[in-house]
Image (cartoon, grey):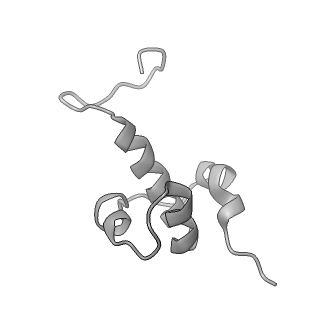
Amino acid sequence: MRHLTRRKPKGFAYLGHSIRSGASSAAEAIKVPRVRGDWLGGWAPGTLTRAKHHIDPTVGPSREAVALLGWLLATGS
């Protein structure tokens, strides 16, 4: 973080868990199918852990999320 121009909020810490939650929230925001997000994050199929603890519903869709995770989007057959 010290190499970036952005600063974390006072009293806040970014952890490895933050990266996992951020990616999970971004995937959900762009409507990646839940089973694919679970697979990518290494969660057991059908687990509620990701939904309860790793998805922030206030995260909105972004071009960056599509660029990084768009390959997980469902495609028509």
Q: Position of residue 45 (x, y in %)?
A: 47, 72
Would residue 2 appear left or right of 73 to someone viewing this image?
left
Residue sitting nearer the eye, 67 or 37: 37
Q: Position of residue 23 (x, y in %)?
A: 49, 51
Q: Position of residue 57 (x, y in %)?
A: 36, 65
Q: Is residue 29 above or below residue 46?
A: above
Which residue corresponds to the image point at 36% horizontal and 43% vertical from the top-left? 17
Residue sitting nearer the eye, 66 or 51: 51
Q: Which corner quadrant of the image does residue 11 belong to?
A: top left
Q: Quadrant of the C terminus?
A: bottom right
Name the residue furthest left: 11
Q: Position of residue 29 (x, y in %)?
A: 50, 64
Name the residue furthest front: 44
Which residue corresponds to the image point at 57% horizontal and 73% vertical from the top-left? 33
* Count of all numbered marks drawn on residues in the image: 0
Name the residue furthest right: 77
Name the residue furthest bottom: 77
Which residue corresponds to the image point at 44% horizontal and 62% vertical from the top-left? 43
Would residue 1 appear left or right of 68 to someone viewing this image?
left
Q: Is residue 22 above or below residue 53?
A: above
Q: Which corner quadrant of the image does residue 47 belong to?
A: bottom left
Q: Is residue 13 above or below residue 36?
A: above
Residue sitting nearer the eye, 38 or 7: 38
